[in-house]
Amino acid sequence: MAKDFRQGSAQLTAPTVEDGRYIYNGGIASVPQSYPSAGPRPANRKAVRRKHSTFNIVGALFILAAACLLYTGNVIAVNQLMKEVNDLTVRYNTIASNNEVLKAEIARKSSLDRIGTMAKDELGLVNPKEPPVWFEIDQDKVDDLTKESR
């Protein structure tokens, strides 16, 4: 059996050969001063359930990537439409200004003074100095001529 040794308030027991608690060190048995208490083996930790599964995280990243692609595509499409609208506005303004130039040219060329000078210079037309003479035609002669021509 073990012998009791007292040191202050702690009680130590020296191992004996009968206890099988001695330390053999090269032919010399040494007795440890104290032994750690060998309690029950600690149980394995409980499995911790993750708050967010890997599948959910990957799915959320996939959805985020798809949303980013859709947003980027939308921005590109809107920019292209704005460029097309700008080009069409420039084209419309050019055509409208050309129309105004043509209307001004039509107004200038259709003025009565210009037409009168061109008729006189190019075609030799002049205004008559005498008023026109009215003469009457006999209806009987007209009927006779129409009967003969038939």
Image (tube, rainbow, N blue to C red):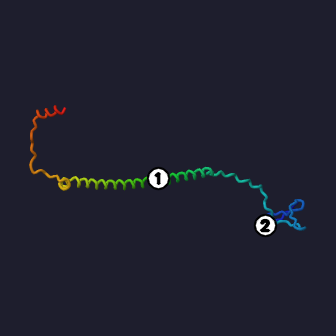
Q: Position of residue 88 (x, y in %)?
A: 38, 53
Residue 114 in sight here: no
Residue at x 20%, y 55% (from the top left corner)? 122
* Relative horizontal placement of residue 108, taking residue 26 as reference (left or right): left
Characterize the local packing of mark 1: few (<14), some (14-19) or many (20 or more) Cα atoms within 10 angstroms: few
* Relative horizontal placement of residue 141, taking residue 48 as reference (left or right): left
Quadrant where the C terminus sits is top left
Identify the amino acid type marked 1.
Ala
SS of the residue under disc 2 = loop
Q: In the depicted view, which residue is nearer to us: 43 or 30?
A: 43
The mark lying in front, picked from 1 and 2, is 1
Residue under numbered circle 2? 8
Q: In the depicted view, which residue is nearer to us: 148 or 6?
A: 148
Query: Quadrant of the rendered structure where residue 14 is?
Result: bottom right
Q: Position of residue 139 (x, y in %)?
A: 11, 34
Q: In the depicted view, which residue is nearer to us: 127 or 85?
A: 127
Quadrant where the N terminus sits is bottom right
Residue at x 46%, y 52% (from the top left corner)? 77
* Relative horizontal placement of residue 67, taking residue 30 as reference (left or right): left
What is the spatial separation of the Cα atoms under label 1 and label 2, in whole angstroms? Answer: 88 Å
* Relative horizontal placement of residue 119, taking residue 19 as reference (left or right): left
Identify the amino acid type marked 2.
Gly
Q: Position of residue 78 (x, y in %)?
A: 45, 53
Residue under numbered circle 1? 77
